Image: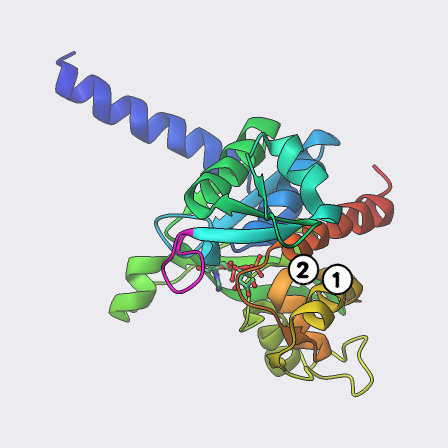
């Protein structure tokens, strides 16, 4: 076989095997932002079959650009153990004990690498456009290529099935939106609906990100800014401890739910 054919057939075969092997999952994660990447790592470490579906070509969500494109972010003391677990370096801020700066590109790439090394699979340039909803339960995701979505091509999607679905889509909470609008799900919030994100209040937002990380409907969990949007939490800008802790918390919640 010519090398040109070897390369093409090897890529097509190994991608197809990967996708086929992940059509039935323990946990289907939507979005490859920081909270979801931490969740993916700990769920995979526990032996679960996990895949992340990320709309963009590059996963990492809102981590790459730091604050206003100054590519540094801040993490506080209580989440430093997670940076250490991923091997991501950090520097203490001299006049703010308990707070650290780190390179946002190292954080993004470190979280991605850590999740993949733990065994999670990542399907990038794939958009989740709907949920599978059968007999009152969220059973999986409806996926399509992002270029198909972006170009508005009339192409039917495919599906993946999962015991748990995690909405890690950040500020818009896209999957929980879909679930409330299309399946008329009542969420575990005071109104049964999405309360909507509040403006910036850093320390409050950081604490609420973790508190709001919950199972909002049987089989449907939210982490990170998605959880804050669902439960009406404050935003916090380029401090990421809450995101990392939210990812670790949701992994524990899902493991407890699936009892694996
Ligand atoms: O928003 P994002 O980074 O998620 P997060 O873990 O972290 C939030 C912070 O980055 C930042 C912040 C911290 O102060 O406020 O915003 O909550 O990443 C969400 C990812 O989900 C992808 C999107 O491209 C991004 O990479 N995404 C969103 N909707 C879909 C999706 C979808 N329908 N299908 C696939 N991916």
Question: In the image, which disc is placed on residue 223?
Answer: 2
Q: Which mark is residue 233?
A: none
Indicate yes or no: mark 1 CB to ligand 1 under 8 Å: no
Q: Residue at x 42, y 44 (%)?
A: 105
Residue 217 visible (yes or no): no
Q: Over which residues does the magenta segment extend?
A: 64-71
Q: Position of residue 54 (x, y in %)?
A: 46, 52
| Between discs 2 and 1, the one toward the N terminus | 1
Most extreme residue toward the top is 1
**Element carrying mark 1:** loop
Residue 180 locus on image (x, y percent): 66, 79
Quadrant of image for the N terminus: top left
Give the overall secondary structure of the magenta segment. Answer: loop
In x, y percent, where is residue 210?
75, 60
The answer to whether 147 appears left or right of 120 in the picture is: left
In the rendered view, tell whether residue 75 sits above or below residue 25: below
Instruction: Reply yes or no: does residue 236 show up in magenta.
Output: no
Residue at image point 38% right, 62% down: 156
Is label 2 in a helix, a strand or a loop?
A: loop
Q: Which class describes the residues within 10 Å of circle 2: few (<14), some (14-19), or many (20+)?
A: many
Q: Is residue 112 left or right of residue 195?
A: left
CB under 8 Å between discs 2 and 1: yes
Q: Nearer the viewer, residue 194 or 71?
A: 71
Give the side of residue 30 with respect to residue 163, left or right.
Answer: left
Task: Residue 70: give x, y in percent of width and height.
Answer: 38, 57
Quadrant of image for the C terminus: top right
- Which residue position is annotated with label 1? 213
- Tell me if residue 260 can be seen: yes
Whether 160 is drawn above or below 187: the answer is above
The answer as to whether callout 2 falls within 8 Å of ligand 1 is: yes
Tag count in the figure? 2
Mark 1 surroundings: few (<14), some (14-19) or many (≥20) residues within 10 A: many
């Amino acid at each position: 076989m010519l090398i040109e054919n070897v390369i093409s057939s090897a890529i097509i075969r190994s991608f197809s095997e990967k996708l086929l092997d992940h059509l039935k999952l323990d946990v289907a994660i939507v979005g490859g932002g920081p909270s979801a990447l931490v969740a993916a790592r700990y769920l995979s470490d526990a032996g679960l079959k996990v895949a992340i579906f990320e709309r963009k070509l590059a996963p990492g969500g809102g981590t790459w650009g730091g604050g206003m494109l100054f590519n540094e972010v801040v993490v506080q003391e209580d989440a430093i153990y997670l940076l250490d677990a991923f091997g991501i370096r950090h520097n203490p801020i001299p006049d703010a004990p308990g707070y650290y700066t780190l390179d946002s590109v190292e954080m993004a790439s470190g979280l991605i690498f850590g999740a993949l090394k733990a065994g999670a699979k990542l399907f990038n340039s794939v958009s989740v456009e709907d949920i599978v909803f059968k007999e009152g339960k969220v059973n999986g995701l409806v996926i399509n290529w992002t270029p198909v979505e972006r170009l508005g091509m009339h192409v039917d999607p495919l599906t993946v099935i999962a015991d748990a679905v995690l909405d890690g889509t950040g500020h818009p909470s896209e999957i929980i939106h879909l679930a409330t609008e299309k399946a008329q799900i009542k969420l575990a919030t005071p109104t049964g609906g999405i309360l909507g994100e509040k403006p910036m209040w850093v320390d409050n937002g950081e604490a609420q990100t973790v508190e709001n990380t919950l199972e909002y409907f049987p089989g449907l969990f939210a982490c990170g800014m998605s959880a804050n949007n669902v439960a009406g939490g404050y935003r916090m800008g380029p401090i990421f401890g809450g995101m990392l802790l939210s990812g670790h918390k949701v992994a524990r919640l899902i493991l407890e739910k699936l009892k694996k």
